[in-house]
Image: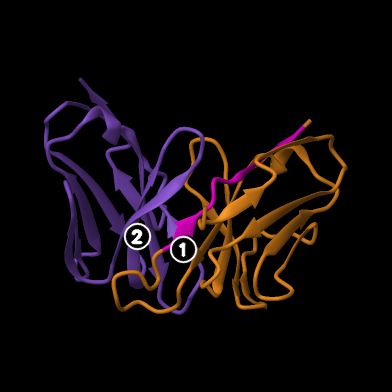
Chain colours: A purple, B orange
Amino acid sequence: KNEVEQSPQNLTAQEGEFITINCSYSVGISALHWLQQHPGGGIVSLFMLSSGKKKHGRLIATINIQEKHSSLHITASHPRDSAVYICAVRWRGSQGNLIFGKGTKLSVKP
Amino acid sequence: DTGVSQDPRHKITKRGQNVTFRCDPISEHNRLYWYRQTLGQGPEFLTYFQNEAQLEKSRLLSDRFSAERPKGSFSTLEIQRTEQGDSAMYLCASSFPGFSGPLTGELFFGEGSRLTVL
């Protein structure tokens, strides 16, 4: 079993839909990252969370430390949101070793 | 451009050859990370530097892999005697230390160096 599990693996949505991507992890963590990767490889950091909730534009990230679960929400989705969204956790006792999920491939249709 | 830069962006080499990748982090960042990503998978941690000190290495990093950050600025990742299984995207990221504040701990990634071993 992977230490970081994302669901769904693939997601197709219509423009304007509200989207939720989930991340569950099995290790104790000090922080969780949500990353966006476009075709061609470039990765952009969206959020880093250690508790609660963060919002940036149409993106919202939440984390429940007790339940070892995080969600990434996209409101009013747009075709330019199409990308792979990756959850990564920084487990306790390591400053550098991030454990990554396999990613959720999102495709938003116009 | 003051982001993380990696060079080369693409490298095609024959099995058995040595390759070296370079990463220039954002200048104020003292932490630098190397990751490897194969097709359809999430990135995997390889190694991590704080300033010039290599603080962590993954067990994935065999003896053929070596990374340096001699002056605490740019870093190099060398793969000796490349194998076809080394074909992957090699990603570099940098960050401020710590976990408080809006930016500390946030990762900034380069565009990656794609290696193809024939």
Q: Is residue A11 above or below residue B115?
A: above
* Residue wearing tag 1: A98
* Residue wearing tag 2: A33
Question: What range is drawn magenta here?
Answer: B107-117
Residue shown at 31% from the left, 78% from the top: B100
Residue shown at 24% from the left, 48% from the top: A22
**Mark 1 residue element:** strand
Q: Quadrant of residue B22?
A: bottom right
Kindly give the residue lying farthest to the front in the view shown: B1
Q: Are marks 2 and 1 in contact (CB under 8 Å)?
A: yes
Label 1, residues with CA under 10 Å away: few <14, some 14-19, many ≥20 = many
Mark 2 chain:
A
Q: Which of A105/B100 is in front?
A: B100
Q: Earlier in the sequence, mark 2 or mark 1?
A: 2
Residue shown at 20% from the left, 20% from the top: A110
Kind of residue at disc 2: His
Where residue B79 sits: x, y (%)?
A: 78, 53
Label 2 vs label 1: CA separation? 9 Å
Kindly give the residue lying farthest to the top in the view shown: A110
